[in-house]
Image (tube, rainbow, N blue to C red):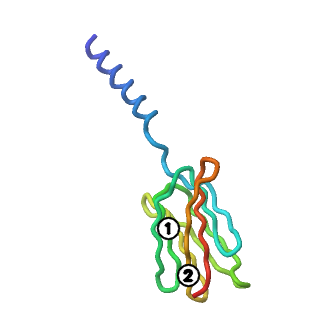
Amino acid sequence: MIGSLALFGFLIGLMIGRLLQPAELRLERVEVVEQGLQLWFNVEPRVRAGHFEGAFILRVESLGREQQGQLPLQGKVVKWRLRREGRELLLRVLATRPLRGEWRAEELDGRWRLTVSLDYE
């Protein structure tokens, strides 16, 4: 009897904990826009950005699937690739010339849009 009450209490505690747990950060979609990308998330993303040998690199602590594509930038083609590295997504943007990138996150209708703006140095 006491064991079944303990098990019942444990299961109720697990259910309450699951309800109060914050939502996991998840990448919903990637859109190519003029001179950059828009990444849509379900909650506010934690982002780190940098440059390495002319490439623009963005790290986001998020779940999501790997993707890749191209975008036009001043009449030339720029390639981007989104890879998983553990619990992070790594966005790497490459071009024939060194890139400069900036990012901005904003909340719209309960979702978060991370806008990445690119330009040549």
Q: Position of residue 13 (x, y in %)?
A: 36, 27
From the viewer's perspective, is 4 left or right of 108? left
Q: Residue at x 70, y 84 (%)?
A: 76
Q: Quadrant of residue 48?
A: bottom left
Q: Residue at x 64, y 68 (%)?
A: 37
Q: Position of residue 93 (x, y in %)?
A: 57, 76
Between 87 and 25, the one nearer to me in the picture: 25
From the viewer's perspective, is 116 left or right of 2? right
Nearer the observer, disc 1 or disc 2? 2
The C terminus lies in quadrant: bottom right
Residue 90: mark in rendering: 1
Residue 27 against residue 52 in the figure, above or below: above
Dot 2 amino acid type: Arg
Q: Position of residue 110 (x, y in %)?
A: 60, 47
Q: Residues within 10 Å of mark 1 (few under 14, many from 20)?
A: many
Q: Secondary structure at mark 1?
A: strand
Between 116 and 97, the one nearer to me in the picture: 116
Q: Is disc 1 in contact with disc 2, using a CB cutoff of under 8 Å?
A: no
Q: Secondary structure at mark 2?
A: strand
Q: Which residue is mark 2?
A: 100
Q: Residue furthest right?
A: 75
Dot 1 amino acid type: Leu
